[in-house]
Amino acid sequence: MESIEQKVKKIVAEQLGVKEAEVKNESSFVDDLGADSLDTVELVMALEEEFECEIPDEEAEKITTVQ
């Protein structure tokens, strides 16, 4: 069974078109993984879908790294 951390890294890799090995806990979505604002919105939506939760916009804006 995958851990939450593994699931998050897999989703990040899929959404941003990078290899899973490139996704580290401290990786910045924008600076390290090349995400733009649309990518980050789509990433939050994918995380909400995977974990069946809702992330408020104010909180979503604070999500800048994998961890």
Image: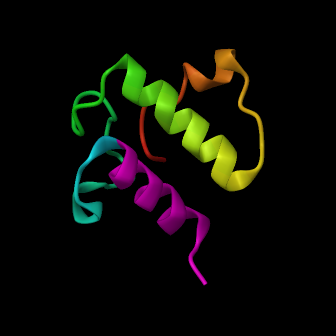
Q: Which residues are magenta?
A: 1-15
Residue 41 vertical position relative to residue 14 in the rendered view, above or below = above
Q: Residue at x 38, y 29 (%)?
A: 39
Residue most extreme to the bottom: 1
Magenta stretch encompasses residue 34: no
Magenta portion: prevailing SS class: helix
By what rule are the colours in the image chosen? rainbow
> What residue do we see at 29% from left, 30% from top?
35
Is residue 1 placed above or below 15 in the rendered structure? below
- Image position, residue 51 (x, y; %): 70, 53
Q: Is residue 8 magenta?
A: yes
Q: Quadrant of residue 60?
A: top right
Question: Between 42 and 6, which is closer to the camera in this rendering?
Answer: 42
Q: Position of residue 36 (x, y in %)?
A: 31, 22
Of the pair 42 and 62, the residue shown nearer to us:
42
Q: Is residue 20 left or right of residue 64?
A: left
Location of residue 34 with respect to 10 vertically, above or below: above
Q: Position of residue 32 (x, y in %)?
A: 22, 37
Count of numbered badges drawn on the protein: 0
